[in-house]
Image (cartoon, helix red, strand yellow):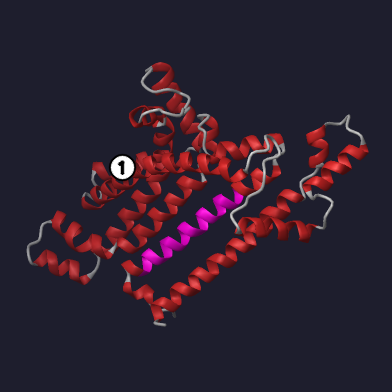
Amino acid sequence: MGPLAGLVARRLALGLLTLFVVSVIIFLGVSLLPGDVATELLGQSATPATVAALRHSLGLDQPLVARYGLWLGGILQGDFGTSLANGRPIGHLVAARFGNTIFLASVAALISVPLSVGLGLLAALYRGSLLDRTINALTLVSISFPEFFLAYILIVILSMQAGLLPSLATLNEGMGLAEQLHRIALPALTLTLVVIAHMMRMTRASILGVLASPFIEMARLKGASPARVIVRHALPNAWSPIINVIVLNLAYLVVGVVVVEVVFVYPGLGQLMVDSVQKRDIPVVQACSLLFAATFVGLNLTADLLSMLANPRLRHAR
């Protein structure tokens, strides 16, 4: 096994260990919540015998370690259990909702990634100019506001006052792609404004850092234009931190959409988790949390691997 393959194997093993620890934290955190699930489902008027029978059927009378083992074993076999609220398989519930979340995150990524890289290149190319200061000011404003605040501002301006976009991002079966994009325009724009600042500022900082290198000075002495210096010489050598921050923000687009989905009533995984918390549907909450954690860990591993591929100096462990 070569050095790069060994490093990748160690990163994957660390990712699996992290996911295992996260699964323990999720299970313990949800299991130790105050209140009894059986009592919540049956109501306060239920008899002790009925509550005990439901606890037995749900496996709540077993030791915590045994319940965790059964839960983790089922997940490893692709069985997330059954929803307590409607009796449907959890796998079917989260699959549809997770697909909607990925769709929203993908649309936001297709807008934010090229826009942020382009703005970062322009800010670096015209460093210190009015354009650079304007871009930095606008991104600083967008990064200073929380998601729900931006969401409500966009609803007031683009939906209530201008009437251009719907305030609720509801999706129905059989809806065409154009109509879906129209419905999710506001939440996608909200996510774009939230993540674009990080990627743009990292792109600008990475480009400016590379511009101080001797080979950049050599390219300038050979008569290369400023645009050519940045695009052909600086950008390829600045990809490693840019790729890392892009992938980490993509992870946020998937994992951090809970607030945005709730504001726009979008039928994604975040909305499902919030609804399940209100209904005390513990198995669904656990499944959603674990799926979010797996996505975040997986994209973090992807960011590390892409950084190693983009920067040969990171391929060798120190």
User: Is 18 one of the magenta-colored residues?
Assistant: no
Q: Which residue is mark 1?
A: 135
Residue 141 or residue 98, whichever sits in front: 98
Three-letter amino acid code at the position of disc 1: Ile
Residue 204 or residue 91, whichever sits in front: 91
Residue 194 appears in the figure? no
Q: Position of residue 85 (x, y in %)?
A: 69, 35
Q: Secondary structure at mark 1?
A: helix
* Quarter holding residue 307: bottom left
Q: Residue at x 39, y 23 (%)?
A: 165
Q: Main secondary structure of the magenta part?
A: helix
Q: Residue furthest right?
A: 48
Q: Position of residue 89 (x, y in %)?
A: 62, 43
Residue 246 appears in the figure? yes
Residue range highlighted in magenta: 289-308
Q: Position of residue 114 (x, y in %)?
A: 29, 47
Report the side of 177 relative to 275 (left or right): left
Q: Residue furthest left?
A: 223
Decide: few, some or many residues near mark 1? Use Cα within 10 Å; few <14, some 14-19, many ≥20.
some
Q: Residue at x 57, y 36 (%)?
A: 271
* Quarter holding residue 303: bottom left
Can you say which quadrant of the picture contains the C terminus?
bottom left
Q: Position of residue 287 (x, y in %)?
A: 62, 48
Q: Total of numbered circles in the picture?
A: 1
Above or below for 47 versus 157 = below
Residue 28 or residue 160, whichever sits in front: 28
Can you say which quadrant of the picture contains the N terminus?
bottom left
* Quarter holding residue 162: top left
User: Is 300 one of the magenta-colored residues?
Assistant: yes
Q: Residue at x 78, y 46 (%)?
A: 58
